[in-house]
Amino acid sequence: MQLLKNFRILKASSLVESVIAISIISICVLVVFMVYLNVINLNKSVHYYKAKHTIEFLTQEIIKQQDYEDNIFKYEGYTVTKKATIDDEDQMVLLSFLIQTGHNEYQVNKLIPYNE
């Protein structure tokens, strides 16, 4: 009984403080949920990253060999379609690569110098 007499009773918090605390917690949960959804949506397959690596390799080969013809490259799990557009005035070549992995398609553009 002696312990209960020494116990100080805290004043109750007001309704406004409770609403503010719940609002802050709700905003934090909303931000965390949005970040989580963005991370989940950016998830790409391994074939996409392999195709990106293949495009870098193909770009270097095109610069060395100056092969500006349209081609289709088929690999296991993905297909890369190359289109080259030559701009003689600016002496540049626009390389457009279309990556097809399953039902997904991704467009990658590269700009390289054009040597006649």
Image (tube, rainbow, N blue to C red):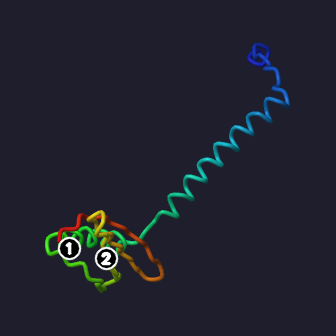
Near-viewer residue (89 or 65): 89
Label 1 residue SS: helix
Task: Indicate left or right for 79 with 42 as reference.
Answer: left
Instruction: Give the numbered dot on residue 62.
Output: 1
Report crowding for label 1: few under 14, some 14 to 19, many 20 or more residues within 10 A (C-alpha): some
Near-viewer residue (90 or 77): 90
Near-viewer residue (23 or 59): 59
Give above or below for 61 relative to 37: below
Instruction: Give the numbered dot on residue 41.
Output: none
Give above or below for 30 relative to 65: above
Position of the C terminus by quadrant: bottom left
Residue depicted at 40% across the width and 79% down the height: 101
Residue depicted at 60% across the width and 53% down the height: 34
Give amino acid for label 1. Answer: Ile
Asked if disc 2 and disc 1 are in contact, CB closer than 8 Å, the reply is yes
Q: Is residue 75 visible?
A: no
Position of the N terminus by quadrant: top right
Q: Is residue 88 visible?
A: yes
For disc 2, the marked residue is: 84
How far from the left and from the top, in percent, is residue 103? 48, 82
Rendered image quadrant of residue 16: top right
Give above or below for 23 relative to 80: above
Instruction: Mark 2 or mark 1: name the one nearer the start of the chain.
Output: 1
How far from the left and from the top, in percent, is residue 79? 34, 83
List the single residue furthest toward the right.
15
Give amino acid for label 2. Answer: Ala
How far from the left and from the top, in percent, is residue 14? 84, 27
